[in-house]
Image (tube, helix red, strand yellow):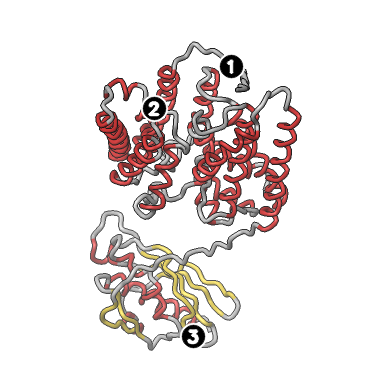
């Protein structure tokens, strides 16, 4: 029988698997501490407690699942856990979800990640898919409504720009849009709400560099993955005329940086050769951008990782052989994949269209109207003081100062009169509009007169008309009626 042997290049390292996983755990916990500090400073201790509750539930489910598995396999439980590192998957999964996530989805997501994606495939080192990615996908498909962001985390960078069609060309709109996250520098530092551990791109980059120096991860994967996202985003920016902010936004926002450092670099689920890992990273970058710009989900990191995990065996077979001897083949493959990605993104870029944002109409609080007040009823009462009068086309604009509840009945120290602007049709002597300029009466009571439901009653009235007062604010309503009567009297006297 003929045997064929193939010797691959090998590298000896002083680090054990335990040391590598410990460094990875320290890196992840650094992100946890950053997030804890952010939520404590910005939203209070309750959010920090919930963050650590999520972490405790996920780690407990992960450790318990593997302990039970080891028990039924009749293995030493403590020794098994020390070489299986279930807590790493649990921490990564928690860092991928929003702070509003309830406890039960994170427990179920962790269970699927550990039991289904890991143990059923043979345990540590035998999984086909990224474990945390599987857990996140299960949570998204099964508990989408339950893990949607709350009011704190609703305006995430990726979902926000996706709602605009990924295209923001107006300079004023762009400035306003970026300002909600502190601009590009704010995205870099990550002091804004989002997925628990995915916001601070700078912190994740620093941890990634540290782990690469310590040989915990292969630097090629995050560099080529983020590089692909940057280049493809720059291509779209050039097509749409968006500027450098767009590629920077894509690499700093969302889960790209987190996925590049903590998920794509999983040595079990990515190819073994250097060239294979480059192809793997570029492919993931292309899929991420395609899902972001054209998919139903605003974020494409998790799905790009899981898709490329499926392709890892094929990439390994394709890149099998002496790396130096077949370098031309690998360079050609990498270049071809890059060109394909650029062509796809070119098509996508030309078809992107900005979404027109309609300004929401301001909410008008409901008020109740009560007894009617005739305008001429106030003729002999407290008189309004005419502060100014000017002609605007066929209307006369009169600014009237009138005593309200604060002066007449409130007895407030330092009480001030109200001010009302009245537009009167100069020829017909009818009211065109009434605008409350200043209300010094009781807040949330007298201020209710500044409401279209009350003010629109004056339209087309003359001195013989009447309006209904605002319930609970009769004196303030009367002050506005007196101001309107004074304005009509002023315009009438000016004829």
Q: What residue did someone put label 3 on? A: 429
Q: Earlier in the sequence, mark 2 or mark 1?
A: 1
Q: Quadrant of residue 462?
A: bottom left
Where the N terminus falls, by quadrant?
Answer: top right
Task: State the CA–CA distance, disc 1 to disc 3.
Answer: 96 Å
Q: Earlier in the sequence, mark 1 or mark 3?
A: 1
385 or 191: nearer the viewer: 191
Q: Earlier in the sequence, mark 3 or mark 2?
A: 2
Residue 227 vertical placement versus 439 (above, below) = above
Q: Are marks 3 and 2 in contact (CB under 8 Å)?
A: no
Residue 301 image offset from top left, x and y in percent:
52, 43
Point 49% across, 34% down: residue: 263
Nearest to the eye among marks 1 and 3: give it.
1
Nearest to the eye among marks 2 and 1: give it.
1
Point 61% across, 20% down: residue: 5
Task: State the CA–CA distance, disc 3 to disc 2.
Answer: 74 Å
Q: Is residue 44 left or right of residue 209?
A: left
Q: What residue did someone put label 2 on? A: 29
Residue 296 image offset from top left, x and y in percent:
52, 56
Q: Determine the secondary structure under disc 2.
A: helix
Category of crowding for the residue at label 3, using alpha-carbon neighbours closer than 10 angstroms: few (below 14), some (14–19), many (at least 20): many
Q: Quadrant of residue 418?
A: bottom left
491 or 314: nearer the viewer: 314
Task: State the CA–CA distance, disc 2 to disc 1.
Answer: 31 Å
Q: Could you tell me if residue 298 is visible in this image?
A: yes
Category of crowding for the residue at label 1, using alpha-carbon neighbours closer than 10 angstroms: few (below 14), some (14–19), many (at least 20): few
15 or 445: nearer the viewer: 15
Q: How many marks?
A: 3
């Amino acid at each position: 029988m003929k045997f064929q042997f193939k010797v691959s290049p090998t590298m000896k390292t002083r680090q054990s698997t335990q040391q590598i996983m410990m460094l990875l755990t320290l890196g992840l916990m650094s992100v946890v501490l950053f997030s804890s500090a952010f939520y404590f400073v910005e939203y209070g201790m309750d959010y920090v407690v919930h963050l650590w509750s999520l972490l405790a539930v996920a780690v407990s489910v992960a450790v318990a699942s593997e302990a039970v598995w080891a028990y039924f396999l009749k293995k030493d439980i403590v020794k098994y856990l020390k070489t299986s590192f279930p807590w790493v998957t649990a921490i990564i999964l928690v860092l991928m979800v929003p702070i509003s996530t309830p406890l039960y989805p994170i427990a179920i997501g962790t269970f699927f990640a550990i039991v289904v994606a890991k143990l059923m495939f043979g345990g540590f080192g035998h999984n086909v898919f990224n474990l945390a990615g599987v857990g996140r996908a299960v949570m998204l498909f099964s508990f989408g409504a339950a893990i949607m962001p709350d009011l704190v985390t609703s305006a995430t960078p990726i979902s926000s720009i996706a709602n605009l069609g990924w295209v923001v060309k107006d300079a004023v709109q762009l400035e306003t849009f970026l300002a909600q996250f502190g601009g590009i520098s704010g995205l870099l530092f990550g002091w804004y709400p989002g997925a628990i551990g995915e916001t601070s791109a700078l912190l994740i980059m620093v941890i990634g560099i540290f782990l690469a120096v310590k040989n915990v991860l292969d630097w090629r994967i995050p560099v080529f993955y983020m590089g692909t996202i940057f280049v493809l985003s720059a291509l779209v920016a050039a097509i749409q005329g968006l500027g450098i902010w767009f590629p920077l936004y894509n690499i700093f926002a969302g889960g790209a940086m987190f996925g590049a450092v903590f998920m794509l670099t999983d040595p079990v689920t990515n190819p073994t050769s250097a060239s294979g890992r480059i192809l793997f990273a570029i492919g993931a970058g292309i899929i991420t951008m395609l899902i972001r710009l054209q998919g139903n989900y605003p974020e494409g990191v998790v799905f790009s990782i899981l898709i490329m995990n499926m392709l890892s065996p094929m990439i390994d077979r394709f890149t099998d052989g002496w790396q130096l001897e077949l370098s031309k083949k690998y360079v050609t493959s990498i270049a071809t994949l890059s060109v394909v990605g650029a062509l796809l993104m070119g098509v996508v870029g030309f078809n992107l269209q900005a979404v027109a944002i309609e300004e929401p109409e301001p909410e008008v609080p409901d008020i109740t109207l009560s007894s009617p007040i005739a305008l001429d009823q106030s003729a002999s009462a407290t008189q309004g003081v005419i502060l100014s009068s000017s002609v605007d086309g066929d209307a006369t604009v009169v600014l009237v100062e009138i005593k309200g509840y604060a002066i007449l009945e409130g007895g407030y120290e330092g009480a001030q009169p109200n001010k009302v602007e009245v537009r009167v049709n100069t020829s017909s002597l009818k009211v065109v509009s009434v605008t409350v300029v200043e209300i010094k009466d009781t807040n949330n009571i007298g201020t209710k007169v500044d409401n279209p439901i009350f003010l629109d009653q004056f339209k087309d009235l003359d001195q013989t008309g009447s309006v209904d007062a605002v319930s609970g604010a009769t004196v303030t309503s009367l002050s506005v009626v007196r101001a309107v009567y004074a304005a009509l009297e002023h315009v009438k006297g000016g004829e």
